[in-house]
Amino acid sequence: MHVPEFFTQQPDLKSARDKASVDKKIALLRELNKPEIYDIDLTGLVLPGGDLRGFILRYGRLDGASLSGANLTETDFEGSWIVKADLTRANLSNSNQRAVSFQNSDLTEATLQHGVFEGVNFTGAKLGRIKAQRAFMSLANFAGATLDGADLRNADLSHANGVKARFVGADLRNATLTRANLEGAELRGANFENAFCAKPSSTAWRSTRRP
């Protein structure tokens, strides 16, 4: 199923007419979502600030979507492709994003607290200043991603790939980094106080100790 052109038109949120258009899009999406949808193509969806709480879209496509500031709490996008999307300041807390591809997407200042991001592809993504306390990010791929100033306290990053990622000024206190690979990562100013790693003698772990 492909998204109608109506869904990809950029709204002017200062216009009452366009605000009604956004509300109509949300209503139509919720009508589709009974109780969940699989394999739907919503490429280019334009819904900044939209309220999609609890929406279920598994193994679909949201490539290039504009969801800046959207409420995506408790959503379930498992296995979907959300590549090169704008998710700046979006709220994905308590959501299930297992095995989603956010490759090259912009999640700057997004909220990911208590969310499930297991096996997610964040390669090349912008994750600066995200709030991801207690997020489950085991097996996530952060290669080449930017996480400057990210709040990752108590997050589970076990088996994650952080090769050549940027964690400048990131807060990883009490985070789990068991077998995480941070080789070549930029870690200047990152806080690893009480972070847990089962193999502190590994090359990947030693790289986190660099000033």
Image: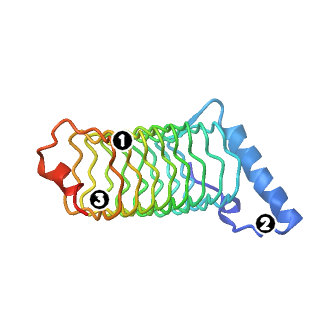
Q: Secondary structure at mark 1?
A: loop
| Mark closest to the chain's N terminus, 2 or 3 | 2
Foreground residue, 45 or 156?
A: 156
Residue 65 in the image, given as x and y percentages of width and height: 57, 60
The residue most toward the right is 16
**What's the residue type where badge 2 is placed?**
Leu
Of badges 3 and 1, the one in the foreground is 1
**What's the residue type where badge 3 is placed?**
Ala
**What's the residue type where badge 1 is placed?**
Ala
| Mark closest to the chain's N terminus, 3 or 1 | 3
Horizontal relation, residue 207 to residue 136: left or right: left
Q: CA distance from mark 3 to mark 1?
A: 18 Å
- Residue at which label 3 appears: 143
The quadrant holding residue 34 is top right
Horizontal relation, residue 112 to residue 174: left or right: right
Of badges 1 and 2, the one in the foreground is 1
The way the protein has been coloured in the rendering is rainbow
Q: Which residue sits at x=26%, y=62%? A: 185
Of badges 2 and 3, the one in the foreground is 3
Q: Is 157 drawn above or below residue 25 in the view shown?
A: above
- Residue at which label 1 appears: 175
Q: Which residue sits at x=83%, y=69%? A: 14
